[in-house]
Image (cartoon, coloured by chain):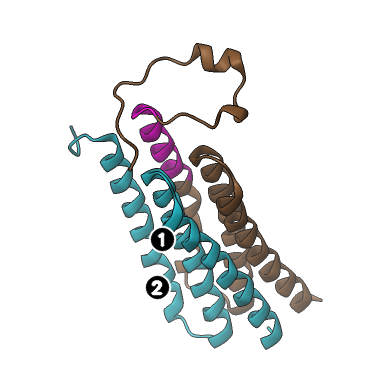
Chain colours: A brown, B cyan
Amino acid sequence: MGSALLAAMLLAGSALSLIAALGLHRFADAYARLHAATKSATLGLALVLASAILTHGTTGREVVTLIFVLMTTPVGAHMISKAMYEIGYRPWEHYTSKRTRADQPSPRSRRRAW
Amino acid sequence: MTPSVVVAALTMLVAAMALAFIRLVRGPHLGDRVVAGDTIALILINMVTVLGIRSATRLFADVAAVVAILGFIGTVAAARFIRGRPPLG
């Protein structure tokens, strides 16, 4: 029973990472890719780390890694999306409504996309 | 943990990392590549943890912690680079 639960957590975590990479591969602009990649990959990592802790016990490092990843992944995603908004990267037009497009302020500076 | 479960989990993680690498190579904008690198770091932590479950040693937990820290630092540095400002300015 316990072993089956741990195996299910491990497989669910790996499947969530695969779903994250699939969204990263399929979505149409960088904001949508960020949305797909960060959240589900973080939840998948949390499931796998919990499975590791419950299987072999912990010396505290897995818990520290889990808390660190849960704290820093949203911060990194926010920093990337804010930086891309400030250099003038626009979302794909089918992801936004006309009113949203009209309300957007002009970017601070426009640069060529790499 | 039976070996077949570990092999299935590692297969899914390798497929996920291949998809993330495709986005890293193809991404039209620099931000796409940064997002792909962030995802690759998360998947790498995942793979290291699964290998730690398989081999029952304590060393893989340290490796996972170091990869987490380096991934976050790389993401923050790339975001500052995208903004085009000097750091702490």
The residue shown at (45%, 77%) is B60
Residue A113, by quadrant, is top left
**Which of the labelled discs sits on residue B46, or is there none?**
none
Three-letter code for the amino acid on which mark 1 is drawn: Ala
Vertical relation: B3 (above or below) A82: below
Label 2 sits on a secondary structure element that is helix
Quarter of the picture holding the C terminus of chain B: top left
A83 relative position to A49: left or right = left
The quarter holding residue A83 reads: top left
Q: Amino acid at mark 2?
A: Val
Q: Which residues are magenta?
A: A74-88
| Residue at the disc numbered 2 | B63
Give above or below for B57 relative to A108. below
Tell me how far mark 1 sits from mark 2, CA to CA: 9 Å
Q: Chain of mark 2?
A: B
For mark 1, what is the residue?
Answer: B68
Residue B16 seen from this side: yes
Give the main secondary structure, helix, strand or loop, of the magenta stretch. Answer: helix
